[in-house]
Image (tube, coloured by chain):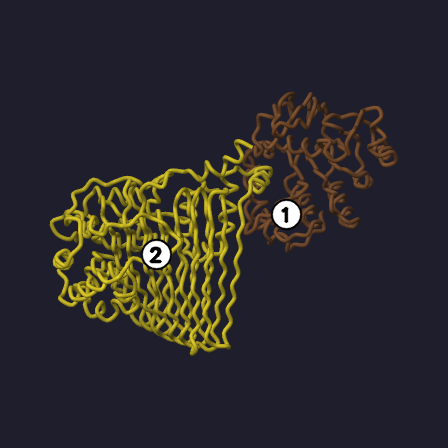
């Protein structure tokens, strides 16, 4: 059984239907890229998987690790190993990154009936992970994302992922707003976290990111459906022909 | 949108948990105020003549004054003749030990979680508990007496230490100071008194717990704390009241005097009944608190966590008279439902190189209105004075309000005044972000609010920082992670 099984998923926001029947199967160890033009539903899919209830699921089902994912609260999804790297990570003034991550990790550990880490154990654990992301230690003592540059925020997301060690990571446009150096750093971090136990869904508008995070599968989303799936070569194909190239066959009428 | 945008509202709608009424006989006078009532209060308390004179003078002054209307709070006019000005639990004589205290009363304290019993000595807290108008029991008095610290009810101080009372009473907040202070001076029925002699560091945290129990009772307690040269003391007051449909008036006065090199730290956790969700009932908390840094290098630090009361009107301030003296004000004020708070501080710099720090954190939820009003005044002689003010507001939801009114008055050129202000809002985005990292909504709100209040909580004595966090938790979230 796949780690994540999405069947005929429909979702809307207000009266507007955005996802119109998504089918997707993701196994542990695989990296899937979801590509598509603006408004195709990429980010909605990521949000629905993480449990954001701005969106209402109207049809279909999502099985994660054999469980009905749609019945779980966002925090339970996180505790069960789903991590979302946000497109726009929010700032939480006054709460240090270190404190936040420790509370987060311990909430997850508690759910899994593991002993909570004390401050000392946590710090040594975290220091190890910081090296991976080439993060400055001072970021730990700063408030969560407060005053971080765009690049620092994205790097902080991947750093959190490294600490929380999810089973399924959903990266929502992690490349947006990054210059090439920052992109490489983030991609290196993500690649270091690839492993046989972990699946990743990488949502991106541009092929560029996929030069650094090479996916096992690429899916093209348009108007709320996956209109084409393939291996990494599909991304390159898209780069050449653009999303418009698919329009002829799939009646894609907006960009 | 539904469940998530409701999160904040649900969390903000927790019930008041201290709203029980204790059923004990009370010895009260008829409602209304005139000179006879004042004579009666003074007589019941067996006060010396000078106290009665002082009260009557204050009363006559009060009659000529009008209620202030400048604060950003709104309430129907108060009928001062419908208030009961004296109400005491019925006992034959003043209790000499805990055994003599009405068990019903002790149960009330237990519900409040006040460490009153002897075994709580380990907690290192001495409690002077004020129930309606009379101080019921003072613990640890003996231990304090060993080092010469006087800590007792105000009535007892008037009887046992009249010279000290006479010397300092009204020297910081004169009876004529303002409408509510004058009313308090006329009718105050009890409160706490503390004197720390020269060079003594008070060996434990002192604490007073106020509770308004009887119906239609005003509580007018008065606290006077004097730290003599080189002395230091840390004092905490906590307040709760039962749920009533009517509004109750609480007009207290606190005076602090710090002589040369003395330090006073005064912390308040105020949780008076705030009224119900429709804004019915609740305490009018009209309080005058002021500290006088009279001596050189003296320091007075106010820390307050205000979560209760229907209306709060309160500006704990410092008169920085002694050279190099220091005044501090750290405040967290939370308004929920229909609560209104107009609170802040006054720092009056008079001596050379005086310094003051103001950190104010206002949290508004529901339809709460939260106003910071602060005055920093630097007089001509206050050469090299410095002030730093920071006022931050946090909004939960979109029906509440935050307002900031800083007044700065600087009369010399060698002083430095800094003022920073910010307003932010807890967003559903922030809560969702936390939940996506495995934290519950309650823990998320609690974490964000505590992050916001951190600088103030840091100033509270350890054991009360925990209490304050819990209180914010109850007032806002229900549980604290």
Q: Name the residue: 19% across, 63% down.
A: B60
Q: Residues within 10 Å of mark 2 (few under 14, many from 20)?
A: few
Q: Locate residue A134, reporting x and y percent.
A: 72, 51
Chain A pictured colour: brown
Q: Quadrant of the N terminus of chain A?
A: top right
Query: In what element is the residue under mark 1?
Result: helix
For the residues tagged 1 and 2, is the chain the same?
no
State the CA–CA distance, disc 1 to disc 2: 55 Å
Residue A108 lies left or right of residue B356; in this view the side is: right
Q: Residues within 10 Å of mark 1 (few under 14, many from 20)?
A: many
Chain letter of the residue beneath label 2 in the structure image:
B
Q: Name the residue: 27% across, 50% down.
A: B78
Report which residue position mark 2 lands on: B69
Query: In what element is the residue under mark 2?
Result: loop
Vertical placement of residue A248 versus A158, above or below: above
Q: Locate residue B45, reporting x and y percent.
A: 15, 58
Vertical placement of residue B235 versus B7, above or below: below
Question: Which tag is nearer the camera, tag 1 or tag 2?
Answer: 2
Q: Which chain is yellow?
A: B
Q: Locate residue A76, reporting x and y percent.
A: 57, 32
The quarter of the picture where residue B320 lies is bottom left
- State the count of labels: 2
Q: Name the residue: 28% across, 55% down.
A: B251
Q: Is residue B148 visible?
A: no
Report which residue position mark 1 lands on: A126
Q: Locate residue B20, reporting x and y percent.
A: 28, 39
Q: Is residue B276 visible?
A: yes
The residue lying toward the viewer, choosing from A13 and B460, is A13
Vertical placement of residue B57 versus A252, above or below: below
Q: Quadrant of the C terminus of chain A?
A: top right
């Amino acid at each position: 059984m796949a780690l994540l099984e999405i069947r005929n998923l429909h979702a809307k926001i207000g009266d507007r239907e955005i996802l119109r029947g998504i089918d997707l199967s993701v196994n542990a160890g695989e990296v899937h890229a979801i590509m598509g033009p603006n408004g195709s539903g990429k980010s909605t899919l990521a949000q629905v998987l993480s449990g954001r209830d701005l969106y209402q699921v109207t049809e279909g089902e999502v099985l994660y690790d054999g469980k009905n994912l749609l019945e779980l609260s966002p925090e339970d999804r996180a505790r069960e190993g789903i991590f979302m790297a946000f497109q726009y990570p929010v700032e939480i003034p006054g709460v240090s990154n270190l404190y936040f991550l420790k509370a987060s990790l311990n909430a997850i550990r508690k759910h899994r009936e593991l002993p909570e880490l004390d401050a000392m154990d946590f710090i040594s654990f975290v220091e190890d992970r910081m090296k991976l992301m080439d993060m400055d230690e001072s970021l730990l003592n700063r408030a969560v994302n407060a005053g971080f540059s765009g690049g620092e925020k994205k790097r902080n997301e991947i750093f959190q992922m490294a600490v929380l060690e999810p089973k399924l990571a959903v990266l929502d446009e992690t490349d947006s707003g990054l210059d090439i150096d920052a992109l490489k750093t983030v991609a290196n971090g993500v690649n270091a976290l690839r492993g046989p136990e972990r699946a990743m869904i990488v949502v991106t508008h541009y092929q560029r990111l996929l030069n650094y995070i090479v996916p096992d599968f690429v899916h093209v989303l348009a108007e709320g459906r996956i209109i084409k799936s393939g291996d990494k070569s599909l991304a390159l194909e898209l780069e050449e022909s653009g999303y418009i190239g698919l329009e002829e066959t799939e009646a894609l009428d907006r960009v | 949108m539904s469940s998530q945008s409701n999160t904040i509202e649900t969390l903000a709608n927790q019930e008041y948990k201290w709203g029980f009424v204790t059923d004990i006989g009370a010895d009260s006078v008829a409602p209304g105020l005139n000179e006879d009532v004042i004579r009666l209060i003074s007589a019941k308390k067996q006060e010396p003549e000078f106290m009665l004179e002082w009260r009557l003078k204050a009363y006559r002054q009060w009659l000529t004054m009008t209620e202030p209307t400048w604060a950003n709070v709104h309430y129907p006019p108060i009928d001062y003749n419908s208030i009961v000005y004296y109400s005491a639990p019925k006992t034959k004589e003043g209790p000499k030990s805990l055994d003599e205290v009405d068990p019903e009363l002790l149960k009330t304290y237990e519900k409040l979680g006040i460490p009153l019993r002897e075994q709580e000595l380990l907690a290192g807290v001495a409690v002077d508990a004020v129930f309606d108008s009379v101080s019921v029991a003072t613990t640890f008095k003996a231990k304090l007496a060993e080092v010469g610290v006087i800590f007792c009810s105000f009535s007892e101080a008037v009887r046992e230490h009249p010279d000290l009372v006479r010397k300092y009473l009204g020297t910081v907040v004169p009876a004529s100071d303002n409408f509510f202070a004058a009313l308090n001076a006329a009718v105050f029925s009890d409160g706490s008194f503390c004197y720390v002699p020269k060079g003594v560091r008070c060996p434990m945290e002192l604490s007073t717990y106020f509770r308004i129990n009887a119906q239609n009772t005003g509580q007018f307690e008065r606290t006077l704390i004097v730290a003599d040269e080189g002395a230091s003391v840390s004092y905490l007051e906590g307040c709760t009241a039962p749920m009533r449909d009517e509004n109750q008036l609480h007009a207290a006065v606190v005076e602090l005097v710090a002589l040369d090199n003395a330090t006073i730290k005064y912390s308040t956790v105020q949780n008076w009944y705030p009224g119900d969700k429709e804004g019915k009932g609740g305490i009018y908390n009209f309080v005058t608190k002021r500290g006088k840094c009279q001596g050189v290098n003296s320091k007075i630090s106010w820390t307050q966590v205000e979560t209760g009361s229907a209306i709060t009107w309160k500006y704990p301030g410092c008169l920085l008279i002694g050279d190099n003296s220091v005044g501090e004000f750290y405040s967290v004020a939370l308004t929920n439902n229909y609560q209104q708070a107009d609170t802040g501080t006054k720092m009056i710099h008079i001596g050379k190189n005086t310094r003051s720090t103001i950190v104010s954190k206002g949290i508004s939820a529901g339809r709460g209105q939260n106003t910071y009003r602060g005055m920093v005044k630097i007089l001509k002689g206050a050469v090299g004075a410095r002030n730093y003010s920071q006022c931050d507001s946090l909004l939960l939801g979109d029906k509440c309000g935050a307002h900031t009114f800083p007044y700065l008055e600087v009369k010399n050129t060698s002083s430095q005044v800094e003022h920073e202000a910010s307003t932010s809002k807890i967003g559903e985005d922030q809560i969702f972000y936390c939940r996506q990292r495995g934290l519950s909504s309650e823990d998320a709100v609690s974490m964000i609010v505590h992050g916001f209040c951190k600088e103030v909580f840091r100033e509270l004595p350890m054991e009360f920082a925990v209490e304050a966090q819990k209180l914010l938790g109850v007032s806002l979230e229900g549980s604290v992670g």
